[in-house]
């Protein structure tokens, strides 16, 4: 439905009615449902480009639904605070990873067949481009930005956290396929059978859903998307570095 307003010259001007929250969430999920197989199966090499296109589309959905930069966690007034949270979070992850990498009992957790054979240049590309743009930018704008912001405006923080985190967990189904076989530390737990592979995917979905709750809380406390971005980047990027250095 659209309503008509009369302009200064008396001409009827059509003013579009804002998109409803349910429609905005549905469109966002539909876009992500296409982006997920694009990133994981069809064109993984174009992940950063896909991320930029998807972010533009999803921010357009948020604005069409009446949202703002602040609803996306990108308001100018919160950026400095968010950057501070991001730096502290990244520092804590760095310290935690350094300690874990130095202990024999936890060092094996960094082994991963998916990137164990990467060269130094390939690791640098992932740390500086693929992770921050192809992974962090896309996932944070989508889940802690657009989805969280849209639902929070209509239903509050609890609903926003629940919806965003649940969908964030589901988003990781495709990347988790073959997880138990790729990480030697998980193979004794889940084995190499089909039921074990399914159990590994379910565990990954639950784990990433719980991580989504943490990211949402960082977003809420800092008021900025930069806070979860910093933590998210550190967890993934330092994982590549540790896996490469400990080969």
Image (tube, helix red, strand yellow):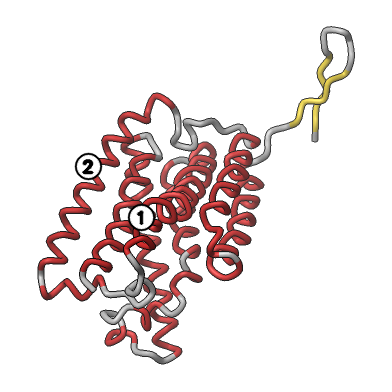
Query: Mark 1 sits on what residue?
Result: 127
The answer to whether 48 appears left or right of 201 in the picture is right
Q: CA distance from mark 1 to mark 2?
A: 18 Å
Instruction: Report which quarter residue 185 is drawn in.
Output: bottom left
In the rendered image, the residue lying farthest to the left is 103
Above/below status of 196 relative to 120: below
What is the x, y in percent for residue 133? 46, 50
The answer to whether 200 appears left or right of 37 in the picture is left
* Dot 1 crowding, Cα within 10 Å, few <14, some 14–19, many 20+: many
The answer to whether 6 appears left or right of 53 in the picture is right
Secondary structure under tag 2 reads helix
Front one among 175 and 46: 46
Q: Residue at x 49, y 34 (%)?
A: 71
Above/below status of 23 relative to 241: above
Q: Residue at x 44, y 73 (%)?
A: 176
Query: Mark 2 sits on what residue?
Result: 88
């Amino acid at each position: 439905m659209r309503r008509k307003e009369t302009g200064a010259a008396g001409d009827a001007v059509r003013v579009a009615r804002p998109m409803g929250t349910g429609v905005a969430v549905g469109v966002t999920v539909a876009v992500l449902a296409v982006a997920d197989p694009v990133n994981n199966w069809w064109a993984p090499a174009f992940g950063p480009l896909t991320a930029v296109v998807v972010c533009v589309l999803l921010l357009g959905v948020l604005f069409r639904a009446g949202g703002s930069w602040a609803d996306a966690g990108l308001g100018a007034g919160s950026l400095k605070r968010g950057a501070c949270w991001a730096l502290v979070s990244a520092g804590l992850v760095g310290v935690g990873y350094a300690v874990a990498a130095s202990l024999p009992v936890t060092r094996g957790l960094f082994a991963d067949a998916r990137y164990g054979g990467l060269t130094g240049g390939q690791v640098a590309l992932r740390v500086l481009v693929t992770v921050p743009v192809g992974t962090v930018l896309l996932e944070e704008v989508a889940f802690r930005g657009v989805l969280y912001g849209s639902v929070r405006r209509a239903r509050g923080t609890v609903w926003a956290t629940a919806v965003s985190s649940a969908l964030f967990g589901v988003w990781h189904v495709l990347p988790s396929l073959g997880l138990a076989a790729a990480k030697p530390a998980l193979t004794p737990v889940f084995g190499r059978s089909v039921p074990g592979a399914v159990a590994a995917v379910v565990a990954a979905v639950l784990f990433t859903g719980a991580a989504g709750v943490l990211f949402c809380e960082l977003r809420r406390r800092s008021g900025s998307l930069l806070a979860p971005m910093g933590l998210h980047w550190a967890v993934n990027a330092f994982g590549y570095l540790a896996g490469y250095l400990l080969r």
